[in-house]
Image (cartoon, rainbow, N blue to C red):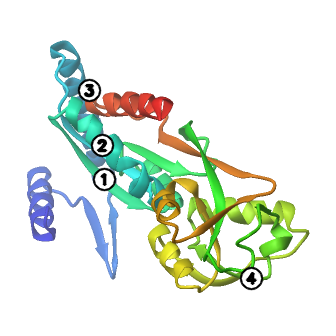
Amino acid sequence: MTQPAVTFQIRQLEEQFNTRLFDRTHNKVTLTDVGKQVYSYADRILKLYEEMTHNITEMTGDVSGAVTLGASTTVAEYMLPLLIGEFKNKFPDVVINLRESNSEDIVNMVENNDIDLGIVEGSVNNKNLVVEECKTDHLVVIMTNGHALASEKKLGVHDYISYPFISREHGSGTQESITSYVEKYGNGESLNICFELSSPEAIKGAVEAGMGLSIVSRSTIIKEIKLGTLTAIELSPSLERPFSFVRQRYKFKSRAADQLLAFSQEFCKDD
């Protein structure tokens, strides 16, 4: 709804109840005691409507409606296109709205009920949410073919710690995994970060341009390895992290959301 439409609806409610629902002061709007009661009842009404819709679709077997799916950048760009395509073939009447951001933002969206289901990289420590591992992702060091380290079979942290490093932005699941890994095996040394970029594609472009090396998911460089445009080297010890489903523990889901979760779980098993 537009802002004027919201204002009109609020004004109608205030006229209906003959009282104010909001206290309006300079640059601040808060609920009055009556407004808090109206909010409480409205919340219950919407939940009952969701429950009615869910129960009726359970009885009729209909799978339709809209589901909002959130995914971290790596997952959204390299895993979801195939998953969503196969899901739509099976359930053509379900509309999927996709929100893409870094892992931290996606977890916050799930917690705030902005999305029905999130798929993120790395660990999630939130007791309010249900976190279920989807699959294990394998990370590797990437560099230009002519890099001084390109002929190595495996690389420890001490091998590349001094080279210019291109990192994902703060809040990224990839960045969090790499930081934890270096802290564990780097003997107190830190990465020589020269750039922070917000997507795997941007990082690959910067690495190909010779601006530094990086650590990325193996799933993001399949094309480059086939074309021979980048060199990928295993880490020692290996670096792995989970892709995980994240959802509300108590939120009532639609049948369409249930089907998307079940389909995604099977998709990850078969992958």
The local secondary structure at tag 2 comes to helix
Q: Give the mark nearer the N terminus: 4 vs 1.
A: 1
The local secondary structure at tag 1 comes to strand
Crowd rating for badge 3 (residues with CA inside 10 Å; few <14, some 14–19, many 20+): some
Tell me whether the residue at label 2 lies in contact with that at label 1, contact meaning CB atoms closer than 8 angstroms. yes
Amino acid identity at mark 4: Tyr
Q: Which residue is mark 2?
A: 84
Q: Give the mark nearer the N terminus: 2 vs 4.
A: 2
Tally the marks: 4
Amino acid identity at mark 1: Leu
Tell me whether the residue at label 4 lies in contact with that at label 1, contact meaning CB atoms closer than 8 angstroms. no
The answer to which quarter of the image holds residue 46 is: top left
Amino acid identity at mark 2: Ile
Amino acid identity at mark 3: Glu
Residue 24 place in picture, x, y as percent:
28, 73
Screen quadrant of the N terminus = bottom left
The answer to which quarter of the image holds residue 149 is: bottom right
Give the CA separation, mark 3 to mark 1: 24 Å
Crowd rating for badge 4 (residues with CA inside 10 Å; few <14, some 14–19, many 20+): some
Q: Which residue is mark 3?
A: 51
